[in-house]
Amino acid sequence: MSAPIVGFAGLTHLGLVSSIVVASKGFRVIGYDDDAARVRDIAAGRLPVVEPDLGELFRAVAGHMTFTSQPGDLAACDLVYISTDVPTDVRGESELSAISALIMNVIAALASEALLVVLCQVPPGFTRRLPLAPERLFYQVETLVFGRAVERATRPERYMVGCADPANALPKPFATLLGAFGCPIMTMRYESAELAKIAINCCLVASVTVANTLAELSERIGADWSEIMPALKLDARIGRNAYLSPGLGLAGGNLERDLATITRLAAATGSDASVIAACIANSHHRRDWALRVLHTEVLSRQRDALIGILGLAYKENTHSTKNSPSLALISALAPWRIKLYDPVVPASAAVHPRAEGAANALAAVKGADALAIMTPWPAFHDLKPPDLARAMAGRTVLDPYRVLDAHDVVAAGLDYFTLGAPPQYAKELVHA
């Protein structure tokens, strides 16, 4: 048979990245979204998501892609992915009404033998209930990472596919598509695949929680967590790619969604999930690290302090602000003045009565009594501590992700605070 035509229904982050990467393997791709304005922007090369290398890859493969806001155009496809991002509510639980409506529209448009593959994350039990013959219905675990999505989609470690009967071979169009990526393909029942995604994230949460817990202890006892991490990564039982860098809690939406799902399922089935509750509590505690430092060093003494904040996205190389530690900090700083800068996210994303957007990083710190670098954007690595010292009115620098060199910051006469190590004060360097 000729190469299958692959459809993607939903052109938000997941669908857009996945469709472009599939097109890069030479497949003809039809991208559908019910937002006609988004479709026009994408067709014109104006991509609504920020990912390293995505724009360049899109320009290279655009000739293989067609975009439409008419679901009937998906009838030309041999298989269609449901690939819209699934939003979460205030409790971290998935909002499934929109995806359910999208799936029904796509099923109505499918050719008689075409396959449907649910790619977006859904809770266990969702896929099996869909009204489509089981031999045409599949669930594929997605493992993209914001800021590294093109890399992850282009070079997957493996594919995990949920199906009605794992003993049966995958249909030819689906097997041909996945085979083009040259990685292992693991088939399992629908519920196992749906839970596999959650299991991966729970393991990541456990690593993050351990790192945050011991990094905080390092801050208190004079250890430096950055000296410990390399030793752990050389342990074969942990590994070089382990999530050991401390952070400000669990940001983004996917990890939060999975913890909420486990909590809900445990309550419904009588299972114990106290370890998950502990991870959530630890995340909330570490999220407020910057606020605690600011109160101790500045806010308790200066009623009208000006705080410069660099970064609004929840992590570098993405426009997403879901559960952003920076936005949480800004919300808690309502009584104080703040200046904001992010190279991608507009200052209007922050809801604050006394916030002022800045044109660049140095403008955001001009006259500031304290600086908090809340997103480790690559551009912030180029900041020079002497320039910061000249621009700031105060001397407190919060750099949780170690964007700056601590010695250079202190040498410039600034006090330096980071995750996983004790504070370093400029006055101590002078007295040394």
Image (cartoon, rainbow, N blue to C red):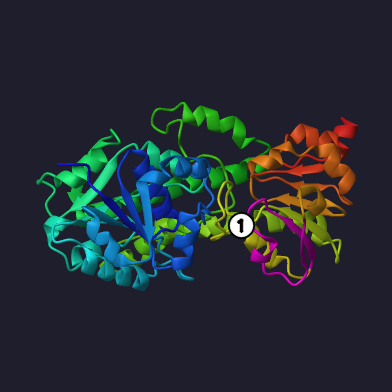
Instruction: Looking at the picture, tell me which residue is in the foreground, 66 or 91.
Output: 66
Along the line of sight, which residue is nearer the eye, 233 or 105? 105
Q: Which residue is under mark 1?
A: 325
Q: Position of residue 282 (x, y in %)?
A: 53, 55
Left/right placement of residue 331 relative to residue 263 reads right
Q: Is residue 208 visible?
A: yes
User: Which residue is located at x 55 percent, y 57 percent?
Assistant: 320
Identity of the amino acid at label 1? Pro
The image quarter in which residue 70 lies? bottom left
Query: Where 102 falls versus 46 (above or below)?
Result: below
Q: Position of residue 400 (x, y in %)?
A: 66, 46
Q: As drawn, is 282 to the left or to the right of 291?
A: left
Q: Is residue 371 above or below residue 424?
A: below
- Which span is picked out in magenta? 336-358
Query: Magenta includes 345?
Result: yes
Q: Which residue is painted at 56% across and 32% down in the image?
A: 228
Q: Quadrant of residue 169?
A: top left
